[in-house]
Amino acid sequence: MVAVAAMATMAAKRTALGLNSPRPDGSEYFVGEAFRVSDGQMDAGWYYAQGDPGGTQRYWDGTQWVGAPQPAGGPAGGAVTVAGGGVPAEWVQRFVAWLINAAIAFALVVALAIVISVGFLINDGLGVVLIVLAGIGHLSFLIWNHIIRQGRTGQSLGKTQQNIKLVRDDTGQPVGAGMALARYLIASLLSSATCGIYGIADVLWPLWDVQKKRLTDKILNLSVIEA
């Protein structure tokens, strides 16, 4: 009776997921392809989703279909995927994105310094006011770019240029400003507590990690993927 009940449950799940219907090429699904026979649960992975074009697969996260259909085998012929089927960004892409953000921030500092210098030439009091306003403006830019913009869209200005984004592993969606701030604070605090050792390891970790994640992103279950 237990075996019959398990088979009935499996059949119901197969029907709900569209796995009782044939693939576009007419061949049939088999239980071992999408289910662990022991418990009838569908493993996370790439499968054909009923209604999608033939020759495609969609990522199943264990509870639902995620993302758009991809060529059979998943992105890049079965490459390592994270965050609901996303392809991890390369370390070089992330580094270039960081350089772009740093260059923009530096250019802003130079521009503000010029404005402040002109202010002091006019009046010392004006120069002091401009220093305060410049500090507030520069900090506001950093918060907007790394916390607000990246939290809302998954992309800082540098990440936009490199076509990569920061997302949550459980949803594949942008992390939100709160999590973006937590990510920055955790990385900064741990780096300070270890005299910079954690910071160096954190930045270099994607070079050898199979999912190409920073240590901080592992802690928070985040990923930087191709947009």
Image: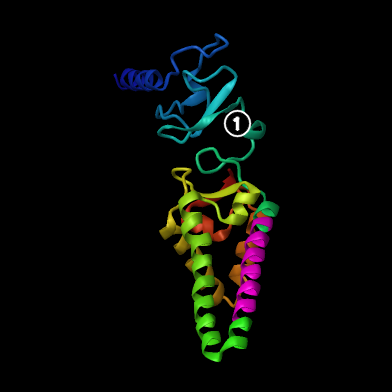
Q: Quadrant of residue 124?
A: bottom right
In the image, farthest residue toward the front: 122
Q: In terms of secondary structure, where does tag 1 sit? A: loop
Where does the N terminus fall, quadrant-wise? top left
Q: Which residue is mark 1?
A: 74
- Residue 149 inside the magenta-drawn segment: no
Residue lying furthest bottom? 124
- Magenta stretch? 96-116
User: Would you say 148 lies left or right of 114 here?
Assistant: left
Predominant secondary structure, magenta span: helix
Amino acid of disc 1: Gly
Furthest-top residue in this view: 26
Report the residue at 52% width, 66% height from top: 141
| Image quarter hosting the C terminus | top right
State the residue in front, 143 or 111: 111
The residue sitting at 44% across, 45% down in the picture is: 170
The correct choice, above or below, for 137 with respect to 2 in the image is below
Q: Is residue 208 visible?
A: no
Question: Is 99 within the magenta?
Answer: yes
12 left or right of 188 in image = left
